[in-house]
Amino acid sequence: MFIFSWLNDQLLRMEWLHYLVTLLVRDVFGLDVNKQVGGSIHFFIYDVSKIFILLSVLIFTISYIQSFFSPERTRKALGNFAGIKANTMGALFGTVTPFCSCSSIPLFIGFTNAGLPIGITFSFLISSPLVDLASVILIASIFNWKIAIAYVLVGIFLAVIGGSIINNLKLEKYVEPFVYENKLIDAAPEELTARDRIVFAREQVRDIVRKVWLFILIGVGIGAAIHNWIPESIISALLGQDKWYSVLLATLVGVPMYADIFGTLPIAEALVAKGVGLGTALSLMMAVTALSVPSLILLNQVVKVKLLAIFVGLVTLGIIIIGYTFNAFGHLLM
């Protein structure tokens, strides 16, 4: 138990990094980390460094493993399941793909074109930006393992239920015809050497970091401002746990934003520290990652308005229900 606690503190929470940043801010910059300016700089440097370190290591590892599984191989594996099991497998596959909502759509097109039911592909499309192994580790490093595991379970549940409903509604005719005309290009993973896999994993890290670095900086900057500059009374007045509309407001505010879970986690961390309900913070995070306007615009190019509206409605309702549930029982996880 002691060893697990030590590993959790040093590898995930990176207390050693927290100490080094404290020395930097205090002894090099000459600032008090307990004051607003020093605290903001400490929050920014520590969170940015921790997120980029964890993100790079985890994306490299996940991508190396993914190099053994081509899209066609994955399609065949998912094609062996039907019904709720198929949706569960689609959602679980989404958890091992480190993609934002926009990056997931090309795979959605490929899977749909390859003959998978759209219910499975929508389960994948919902879970992929919401839940992945890297985000789980980051959530555990910021909050704790109970919250991280609970978040994974509700994310997968939302993906399975959403995909199952879409599948049962028989909405295939609302997918644009060109999606079925594209050919899925398959790569033979068994032909890759160990060096090829390392190069592939390294390129994945580079590509993903290129896509998310700005959102991480913005997210951590907002988190630092909330944590050190905005009075708790103002946050509580807007999003306090006693406000019945807090989850609704957080969900609506999250939709127009565009970021991924790595950029929104620092904001959720700062909000919870200011007394905002865990469910409210998670609703904001889930809305930003799953329902951002750019991803919906891109999805609208491959599905018709009716299917898009059903997708948005189901995910929004699911996020709101999850938010209120976490607000009611989240204290048991803290």
Image: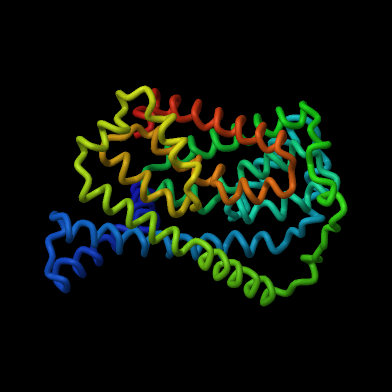
Q: What residue is rendered at 47% in x and 48% in y?
A: 257
The N terminus: image quadrant: top left
Residue 280 percent across, percent down from the top left: 39, 33
Q: Residue furthest bottom?
A: 195
Q: What residue is rendered at 31% in x and 46% in y?
A: 270
Compare residues 255 and 127 and report the one nearer the observer: 255
Q: Tell me how many marks there are.
A: 0
Residue 185 quadrant: bottom right
Q: How is the image coloured?
A: rainbow
In the rendered image, is residue 172 in sight? yes
Residue 140 percent across, percent down from the top left: 42, 46
- Residue 224 shown left or right of residue 57 in the figure: left
Compare residues 69 and 184 and report the one nearer the observer: 184
Residue 16 percent across, percent down from the top left: 29, 62
Q: What residue is rendered at 82% in x and 62% in y?
A: 186
In the rendered image, is residue 131 in sight? no
Residue 176 percent across, percent down from the top left: 80, 45
Residue 233 quadrant: top left
The C terminus: image quadrant: top left
Task: Determine whether 17 is above or below 133 in the image.
Answer: below
Q: What residue is rendered at 82% in x and 36% in y?
A: 172
- Residue 28 shown left or right of residue 103 in the figure: left
Task: Determine whether 171 is above or below 22 in the image.
Answer: above
Task: Determine whether 110 is above or below 205 in the image.
Answer: above
